[in-house]
Amino acid sequence: MNNISYSSVEGRNGRLVVVRFYPGVDLLEGLLEVCTAHHIQQGCIVTALGSLSKAHLIYAVPDNSRKIGIKYCDPIEVEGPLEFLAASGMVGMNEDQKRATHLHAVLSDAQEKIYGGHLVDKGNIVLATIELVIQEFDGIQLLKVEDRETGFNLFVPKSGCDSNSSN
């Protein structure tokens, strides 16, 4: 039998926030700004679509010297125009009590080449629009900390933190 290792908590759905980002906005900066404006400390990206003029992303590559045999590549820049086909991710807090994101996206260029990976903090610039839905979590805290098992900074779910608290 496999050893299944995980952590989980139970919470409630909080508010839904629907946002449209306009041309020129840096997507992750915009996402953090919207979460701050709506006092969202933790939640998930339910859906996101639109277009980018350029994207910066990373993805896993083999590295046998690392704890789990992978590392993330140096950020790559993909020039647009890019269709932003889909995304999913999380919003939580880091150890300094600042909002943090973990957003993955699937993109395609004008030649229909597909790109996918983890969007890095800067350089994901909206072309025409990004339409995005954030689902707030109630009774769940997501804290981004260094994970001993992997060596990566990852969100850890914990009980607590109602959506009524403001930060």
Image (cartoon, rainbow, N blue to C red):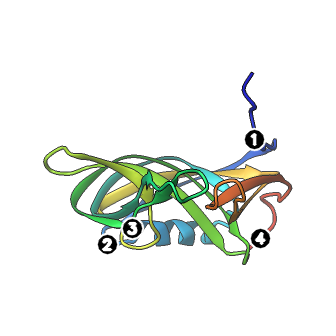
Q: CA distance from mark 4 to mark 1?
A: 29 Å
Mark-to-mark CA distance, 2 and 1: 39 Å
Q: Residue visible at 24% across and 55% down?
A: 82
**Quadrant hosting residue 142:** bottom right
The residue singled out by tag 1 in the image is: 6
Q: Is residue 88 above or below residue 144?
A: above
Earlier residue among tags 3 and 4: 3
Return the residue at label 4: 166
Judge the density around disc 3: few (<14), some (14-19), many (≥20) Cα neighbours within 10 Å.
few
Tag 4–tag 2 contact (CB < 8 Å): no
Q: Quadrant of the C terminus?
A: bottom right
Q: CA distance from mark 3 to mark 2?
A: 24 Å
Q: Residue 129: image x %, image y %?
A: 33, 59
Which is more N-terminal, label 2 or label 3?
A: 2
Q: Amino acid at mark 3?
A: Asp
Which residue is denoted by mark 3 in the rendering?
74
What type is the residue that disc 4 sits on? Ser
